[in-house]
Image (cartoon, rainbow, N blue to C red):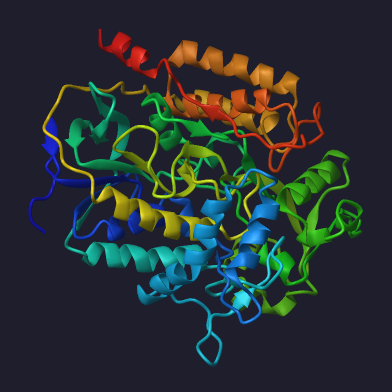
């Protein structure tokens, strides 16, 4: 490929800059054609992105007894009053086309004898509509297909192991590019538009199912550029992370409960029916709190799939089976110890239906964005769907942005957070901003973040963590994935949290002075 990047002080790239190489980022890059797209990935392709780790699959209404309107209704119900209906309508109507597009790229979805997609039932869905790959391998199989396609397209250039330190803004406040770092060298890369597709923030927690390097840095970059951040307090905790002391924790996919696996305590007694009429298929936040309640009471929590799956484990759920066997646990005959773990961020950079953020020239897609489709509690397997649908929409919109003449630029590069400080932050987030929260813990966490900033500066993980904690402190109710022990009620009318760091530009000017 011609005109490849050589890192110098400044590079003019006549096209779209995509930060992140998960499903949302690569979908955006593919959709930007024929405009050139430069994909910057902090890790090697298919490493360090949550998309490749997704197990369950993609929720799409395609069966004869299903309809996008039913999928939309389930999504709205799970979102606890904070979904945006228009965005949900786009997600569910465009879902079938997105699934076929991924299949056409080579994603090997499970098929029936007649060629139809095999679709499974997951929690809070009213129909079996989750398209899977090999039982629990959807994310990695999809990413292998999409990344292979991206590498073959002449309009896409992928640069790996490049970290973005800041969004470049011009004097009018428009995003004009990024400040990037490759090894020891830094470069300003100017482009027509910037699309952030950096994933979530599970790595801010000590117990997470996400790659530990996914720490909300895209969220923080956008906030420091002055973009509106929506609902950052809503973090979804997957109820059934495999509790074997691994970091990150392996995931026991929700599909296991869809197949009939049951949650039991240490004595083998089922407990979910005491928490919700839907038992194991209750919404994730309910199941997560139930598991934490059982664990805190000393009864323990285990997922028993010995009857529902049993001997079929090796070929039906190979990733779960391998994780368990690697820890000396045979899930065919033994219950799996489970714990709630940070899994997905419903909040993020506020965008419109085409991924536009409040800062001109800046777009966002995937988990780092808040499109309005998830509300306060994401419906299972809607995440890969959102990445594919809205990543494509963001790429298509960004390709029409004009390449502007060079203007004065400003950027503030955040300092790094030392490993010991990051470990302390992760422990604090898992202790005080996890499944159950209260004012005492959240206020203590704000003070801890203040101290870490005082010692190490405004590092991106600290910016992201502060957004979550301060919004959680301000929301004096319990809704969806946000549960306040001191405010357990849910207000009649749901309200979004909207934050803009008005001081961001001033902070950058002070740093530059």
Q: Is residue 198 above or below residue 330?
A: above
Q: Is residue 400 left or right of residue 166?
A: left
Locate the C terminus and report the quarter of the image it occupies: top left
Q: Residue at x 49, y 71 (%)?
A: 96
Specify whether residue 241 is in view.
Answer: no
Q: Residue at x 88, y 47 (%)?
A: 299
Q: Is residue 302 left or right of residue 358?
A: right
Q: Residue 246 at what x, y percent from top left?
A: 60, 47
Q: Residue 460 at what x, y percent from top left?
A: 43, 27
Q: Is residue 5 left or right of residue 418?
A: left
How many labels, in total?
0
Outermost residue to the bottom: 114
Q: Residue 173 at what x, y percent from top left?
A: 29, 25
450 and 483: which one is in front? Answer: 483
266 and 328: which one is in front? Answer: 266
Q: Residue 65 at what x, y percent from top left?
A: 66, 79
Q: Name the quadrant containing residue 501.
A: top left
Q: Name the quadrant containing residue 220.
A: top left
Q: Residue at x 73, y 52 (%)?
A: 338
Q: Residue at x 46, y 64 (%)?
A: 140
Specify whether residue 425 is in view.
Answer: yes
Locate the N terminus and report the quarter of the image it occupies: bottom left
337 and 479: which one is in front? Answer: 479
């Amino acid at each position: 490929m011609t005109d490849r990047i050589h890192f110098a002080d400044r590079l003019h790239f006549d096209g779209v800059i995509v930060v992140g190489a998960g499903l949302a980022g690569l979908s955006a890059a593919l959709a930007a054609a024929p405009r050139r797209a430069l994909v910057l990935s902090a890790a090697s392709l298919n490493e360090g992105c949550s998309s490749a780790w997704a197990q369950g699959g993609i929720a799409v209404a395609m069966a004869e007894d299903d309809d996008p309107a039913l999928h939309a209704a389930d999504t709205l119900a799970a979102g606890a009053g904070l979904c945006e209906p228009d965005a949900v309508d786009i997600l569910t109507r465009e879902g079938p086309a997105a699934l076929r597009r991924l299949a056409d790229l080579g994603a090997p979805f499970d098929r029936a004898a007649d060629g139809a997609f095999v679709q499974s039932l997951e929690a809070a869905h009213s129909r079996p509509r989750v398209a899977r790959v090999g039982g629990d391998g959807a994310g990695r199989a999809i990413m292998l297909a999409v990344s292979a396609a991206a590498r073959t397209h002449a309009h896409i250039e992928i640069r790996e192991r490049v970290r973005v330190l800041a969004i470049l803004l011009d004097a009018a406040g428009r995003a004009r590019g990024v400040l990037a770092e490759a090894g020891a060298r830094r470069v300003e890369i100017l482009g027509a538009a910037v699309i952030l597709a950096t994933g979530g923030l599970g790595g801010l927690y000590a117990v997470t199912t996400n790659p530990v390097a996914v720490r909300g840095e895209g969220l923080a970059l956008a906030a420091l550029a002055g973009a509106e951040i929506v609902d950052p307090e809503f973090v979804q905790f997957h109820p059934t992370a495999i509790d074997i002391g691994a970091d990150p924790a392996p995931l026991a996919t929700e599909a296991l409960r869809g197949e009939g696996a049951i949650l039991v305590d240490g004595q083998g007694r089922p407990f979910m029916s005491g928490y919700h009429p839907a038992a194991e298929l209750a919404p994730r936040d309910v199941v997560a709190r139930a598991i934490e309640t059982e664990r805190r009471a000393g009864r323990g929590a285990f997922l028993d799939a010995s009857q529902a799956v049993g001997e079929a484990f090796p070929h039906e759920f190979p990733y779960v089976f391998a994780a368990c066997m690697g820890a000396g646990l045979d899930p065919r005959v033994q219950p799996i110890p489970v714990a709630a773990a940070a899994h997905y961020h419903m909040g993020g950079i506020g965008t419109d239906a085409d991924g536009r953020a409040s800062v001109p020239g800046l777009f966002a897609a995937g988990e780092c964005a808040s499109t309005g489709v998830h509300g306060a509690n994401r419906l299972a397997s809607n995440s890969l769907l959102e990445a594919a649908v809205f990543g494509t929409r963001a790429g298509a919109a960004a390709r029409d942005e004009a390449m502007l003449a060079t203007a004065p630029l400003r950027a503030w590069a955040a300092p790094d957070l030392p490993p010991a400080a990051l470990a302390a932050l992760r422990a604090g987030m898992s202790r005080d901003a996890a499944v159950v929260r209260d004012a005492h813990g959240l206020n203590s966490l704000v003070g801890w973040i203040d101290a870490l900033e005082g010692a190490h500066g405004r590092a991106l993980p600290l910016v992201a963590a502060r957004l979550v904690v301060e919004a959680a402190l301000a929301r004096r109710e319990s809704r969806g994935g946000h549960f306040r022990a001191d405010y357990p009620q849910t207000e009649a009318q749901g309200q979004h949290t909207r934050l803009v760091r008005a001081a961001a530009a001033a902070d950058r000017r002070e740093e530059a002075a």
